[in-house]
Image: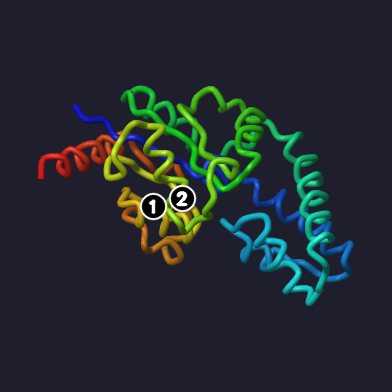
Amino acid sequence: MKKIGVIFDLDGVIVDTAKYHFLAWKDLADHLGFEFTEAHNELLKGVSRVRSLEILLDIGKVEISDEKKQEYLISKNIHYLEYINKMGSEEILPGVNELLDTLDNLGIKYVLGSASKNAPLILKQVNLFERFAGIVDGNSVSKAKPDPEVFLIGAKKLNLQPEHCVVFEDAIAGVEAANKANMISIGVGDEKILHEADFNFENLTEISDDFVKGLVKRTEAIEHR
């Protein structure tokens, strides 16, 4: 039987590190003298660190030199890592371990496909690092989502064609990237926001063993067209 492979986004799917990004960016905004809210933080979802800083500076109407930008990128990451280094397995989102168990039982390999350069560290902190067959993170790609590069590299790590890969994503840019890669996209979160996904679930606890088996059959049908 032809197996599927699975590619997971990290933040919002496996763990919720958005709150730590928010606190680190808020620290910087406070330093620069303007308010940065959780609503503002939504604009940074699925966006690279450099672009996130640009958005933050636009919000505060602050103009700084490129040299200062580099300083702030480093200091933001230092603050973020302080939060990350306190993480534990209790921060794994509901349904994750159960879904990984199902995939293991069915012999389906899975990799991580994340924009985060800290992805390996985070997986180690929550004791999931050893479970993944591979990691594609911000150090492995040159193009950010919605470019499909991260997922196409993930497919290579799984030794599968893109159409045999399933992507779990919580961001619009990630769903778009999965669709561009010709993969099966599963939106995790608000269906109204992630309506372009092939399937939608509020969270991973809603995913049954039968649903996963159905994905295998779906890719088998593609293979025999």
User: Position of 161 compared to 9: left or right?
Assistant: left
The extreme bottom residue here reads: 61
For the residues labelled 2 and 1, the Cα–Cα distance comes to: 9 Å
Nearer the N terminus, badge 2 or badge 1?
Answer: 2
Q: How many marks?
A: 2
Q: How is the image coloured?
A: rainbow
Between 94 and 218, the residue placed more toward the observer is 218
Give percent across and percent down for residue 54.
Answer: 70, 66
In the displayed structure, 89 sits above or below 223; it is: above
Quarter holding the C terminus is top left
The extreme left residue here reads: 225
In the displayed structure, 149 sits above or below 93; it is: below
Residue 41 found in image quarter? bottom right
Q: Secondary structure at mark 1?
A: helix
Q: Amino acid at mark 1?
A: Ala
Question: What crowding class fits label 2: few (fewer than 14 Cα within 10 Å), some (14-19), or many (20 or more)?
Answer: many
Q: Which residue is under mark 2?
A: 169
Front disc: 2 or 1: 1
Q: Amino acid at mark 2?
A: Glu
Question: What crowding class fits label 1: few (fewer than 14 Cα within 10 Å), some (14-19), or many (20 or more)?
Answer: many
Mark 2 in CB contact with mark 1 (< 8 angstroms): yes
Q: Residue at x 38, y 50 (%)?
A: 186
Residue 106, which numbered label? Answer: none
Q: Residue at x 64, y 37 (%)?
A: 91
User: Position of 186 compared to 211: left or right?
Assistant: right
Residue 178, which numbered label? Answer: 1
